[in-house]
């Protein structure tokens, strides 16, 4: 079946996914930043960060040091080069748009759009996390341009890196858990937008992707890994919310911290699982050039 026959439905679904991702950013901000209860829940979680931070901080620093302007530029060039080498110029441009759009959106939201209400807990806004946005967008772009046979492995590695970066920002005390979760949502929103653009511009002869067991199996693995973590996160965060405002002992701080970290891992896993199911349609839509010629590097598929 050709993509053109399913194009309106696919584009509509991708736009809906982008809208849901943007809505998640808004909900996270409203709940954890704009309400006093949300702020106190995250303060409790950050209190738990200090427990054992001395041994974890050096590892977190090494993860965070990877993210830099030069790393971002290199990621842009490498992902575009891989996409072009595979004859997927639409995917190459989409990878650049995904990384650039996500990073720019995060910076605009954090520095110029969103403000943190003053409930006596500090007014410095850190929502969303810039480091996490860079890591997650690079991971998503790498999955987008990777050869089909390698894509599940790239997805698992990229997901691990994006989650590790998100966790590291909290361990270092740079960000609160909601900052990281919002960063994943920003990236998924931009990934969905770029996917919609590629599918909408697909040539008439582009075929739908064939059923791919490795992609589905990997996505199922990521999603099933997220399920118990999500349940744990909801339970611990709800328990913390029931006890605010109030004093928190070490045990409750650790519980709040664990809930926040579980929520971060859940969001990262779900983001990559969803993206891995979307990417085959993007790859198929960009498979042919405008003349219908096949790319030379067929062995890399």
Image: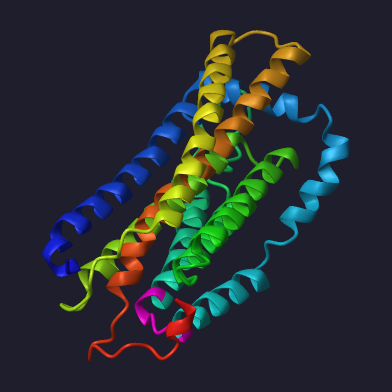
| Quarter of the figure that contains the N terminus | bottom left
What is the x, y in percent for residue 103? 51, 60
Task: Please state if 242 lies on the left or on the right of 89 as rendered.
Answer: right
What is the x, y in percent for residue 194? 34, 64
What is the x, y in percent for residue 65? 75, 59
Q: Quadrant of residue 158?
A: bottom right
Q: Nearer the viewer, residue 281 or 150?
A: 150
Query: Is residue 136 something one can see in this rendering?
Result: yes
- 142 shown above or below 181: below
Q: Residue furthest left?
A: 5
Give the residue drawn at x 11%, y 65%: 5
Give the residue drawn at x 45%, y 87%: 297
Q: Residue furthest right?
A: 54
The residue range painted magenta reads: 85-91
Q: Quadrant of residue 138?
A: bottom right
Give the residue drawn at x 36%, y 45%: 22
- 135 shown above or below 200: above
- Name the colour scheme: rainbow
| Total residue callouts | 0
| Quarter of the figure that contains the C terminus | bottom left
Query: Is residue 127 something one can see in this rendering?
Result: no
- 285 shown above or below 212: below
Q: Nearer the viewer, residue 24 or 232?
A: 232
Task: Please state if 273 lies on the left or on the right of 242 as rendered.
Answer: left
Q: Please tell me whether residue 86 belongs to the stretch shown in magenta.
A: yes
What is the x, y in percent for residue 30? 42, 31
């Amino acid at each position: 079946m050709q993509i053109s026959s399913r194009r309106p439905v696919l584009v509509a679904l991708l736009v809906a996914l982008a809208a849901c991702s943007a809505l998640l950013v808004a909900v996270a901000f409203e709940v954890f930043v704009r309400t006093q209860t949300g702020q106190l829940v995250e303060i409790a979680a950050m209190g738990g960060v200090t427990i054992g931070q001395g041994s974890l901080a050096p590892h977190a620093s090494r993860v965070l040091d990877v993210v830099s302007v030069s790393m971002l530029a290199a990621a842009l060039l490498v992902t575009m080069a891989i996409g072009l080498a595979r004859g997927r110029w639409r995917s190459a441009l989409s990878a650049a748009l995904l990384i650039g759009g996500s990073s720019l959106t995060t910076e605009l939201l954090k520095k110029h759009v969103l403000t943190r209400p003053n409930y006596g807990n500090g007014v410095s806004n850190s929502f969303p996390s810039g480091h996490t946005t860079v890591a997650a967008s690079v991971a998503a772009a790498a999955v987008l341009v990777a050869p089909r046979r390698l894509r599940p492995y790239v997805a698992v590695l990229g997901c691990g890196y994006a989650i590790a970066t998100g966790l590291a920002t909290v361990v270092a005390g740079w960000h609160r858990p909601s900052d990281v979760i919002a960063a994943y949502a920003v990236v998924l929103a931009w990934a969905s937008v770029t996917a919609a653009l590629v599918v909408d511009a697909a040539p008439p002869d582009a075929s739908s992707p064939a059923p791919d067991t490795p992609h589905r199996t990997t996505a199922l693995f990521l999603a099933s890994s997220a399920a118990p973590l999500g349940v744990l996160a909801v339970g611990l965060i709800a328990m913390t919310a029931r006890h605010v405002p109030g004093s928190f002992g070490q045990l409750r701080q650790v519980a709040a911290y664990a809930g926040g970290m579980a929520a971060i891992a859940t969001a990262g896993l779900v983001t990559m699982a969803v993206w891995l199911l979307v990417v085959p349609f993007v790859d198929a839509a960009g498979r042919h050039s405008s003349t219908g010629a096949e790319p030379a590097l067929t062995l890399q598929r």
